[in-house]
Amino acid sequence: MRSLWIMLLSLAICASSIAQNTVGLLSYQQFLSQDGYNLIYPHNQPNVYLLDNCGEIVHTWTDDADFRPGNTAYITEEGFLYKAKRNAAVANDPIWAGGGGAILEIRDWDNNLIWDFEMNDSINRLHHDFAITEEGTIIALAWEYKNTEECIAAGRDTSTLTQKVMWPDWIFEIDPDTDEILWEWHAWDHLVQDFDADQSNFGIVANNPRKIDVNYGREDGHPDWMHGNSLDYNPQLGQILLSVPYFDEVWIIDHTTSTEEATGSTGGFANQGGDLLYRWGNPVTYDQGDSTDQKLFFQHDAHWVDDFVEPFAPYTNQIAVFNNRVGDDFSTVNIFNPNWDMYDSAYPFDGSTFGPDEFTISKTHPDPQQLYSTGLSSVQVLRNGNFLITSGRFGYSFEMTPDDEIVWEYKTPIIGGAPVPQYTELAINNNLTFRMDRYPIDYAAFDNKDLSPKGWIELEPDENYCGELTDVAEVMMEEAFRIFPNPARDMITITWDGMIEAQFMITDLSGKLIKKFDGAGGRKFIKTNELESGVYLISIMTEDANYTQKLIVE
């Protein structure tokens, strides 16, 4: 045991002597990280990049230099890129605020334009996010213009209407095959106000928790009243999740309504029409509770945990958010369970507020000040249980285990949209990155695609850096453990230091657990003739280390 510790310590010292990068890949513990490809669409430039875990580009969708993100991009299983973008110049646009978009596009793997749609005029503008349904339609988020007269008629307090207009959010579903708008929902149809009894929507705000108080929101009176910054669709529930940061809430609405039903308070599977099925994060918005009850603080990337995870994984179908301004100098990522009751077709409501009372989990960086972003940012629960987190204002992404160990780090190597040399020191807002999403290596979109490394975003890259990191990890573990024969037919033997108790786990490449067992005494025999021929991952876990390698069964 002592000799093993000496060997691991010396190799760890060797690893720490590798020059520390400042951009691109910063650190990588290959055997603790979730393998996959990372999609980023950095601000202030037009391209969408797919990176491997070494930080090298494996694919790029380029665009003209006068376009910018608007703000998100997604890859479908069929290998299509769906993205939102806008023109770089916005000075003369009648509707503009941070996160503004203008154009939705579908491009194939070779970057050929398949479809596009533009909404950017004096009445409506796309912004921030969209979702793709299983039928291939797109559910998109937009602003709509309301003039002074409309705002007054809705019961808005004119003393807070400093710019005379408002841009409430609305959501629509469009069919790319026909360009037909199939469905709409407008926040403006679901208002309440207690300011002016002579105008529409007058009522007691506290008695109408499913309505939106037209006089709540940002105090500066900016027309971008709600600033919806993320949208997610749950096809199993037929529901849409919207993040509304100026209310410090997430909202859920029913997509099983017709457009007509979505204007009212009845209809749809839950029979609430287009009223809010659920809201959570800040009950003060509907005159319940006080500031001590607030849980969300200008949150981003609210979504159901359902992408690339197993159906019975710990947080599946709960809601994850990046909680930007929860602290004065740090952010958190949080998961909470809204507890949809399929029998009552409702979310729990105790007569005053929606549950739950607390988060399921709350996470931040081990050094909390390393995770602080007042805007942008994202979180993804990975298949192996790790968390992929992006601090958007610093373009800093990292992967963290459930035990809060950082096992992968990447910093977007861009200033003002232009790549920078390795070892450049970046400051806040230099390399704004709205999100990072990791797609599994076995994702159907990647079948028969060339995903070989094609260089780096950064200039003057440290081409050996990833190899040095992973080579050290490989040596550390391979010297401590041995698995043979590999490829195997009937049985494998695993040997390790006899003083160490170990746990073993065999999974398929998707992460599905095949076998799990313990071992002691330095040697373990495992039958493999019960496994189908193919490639598996075998993981060895001890108190001191974790090791994963491929196992081929013939």
Image (cartoon, rainbow, N blue to C red):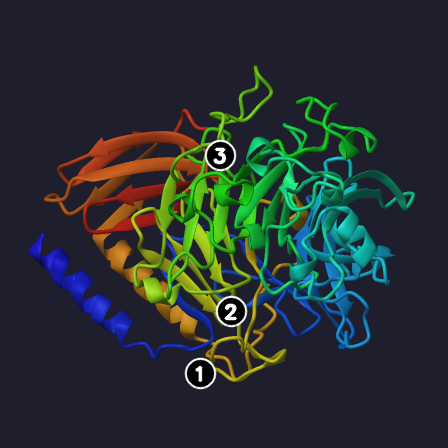
Mark 3 and mark 2 lie on one chain; the one further toward the N terminus is 3
- Left/right placement of residue 174 relative to residue 428 reads right
User: Residue 313: percent from the left, percent from the top?
Assistant: 44, 33
- Taking the view exactly as shown, the residue that stands out farthest to the left is 2
Q: Report how far apart the C-alphas of labels 1 and 3 lie in the structure.
A: 38 Å
Image position of 277 with respect to 449: above or below = above
- The residue closer to the viewer here, 217 or 237, is 217
Among the 4 quarters of the image, the one containing residue 174: top right
Picture disc at residue 393? 2
Q: Residue at x 27, y 72 (%)?
A: 16
Name the secondary structure under disc 3: loop
Q: Quadrant of residue 63?
A: bottom right
**Residue 137's x, y, as percent?**
79, 41
Residue at 48%, 71% (x, y): give it: 394
Residue carrying label 3 = 316
Q: Secondary structure at mark 1?
A: loop
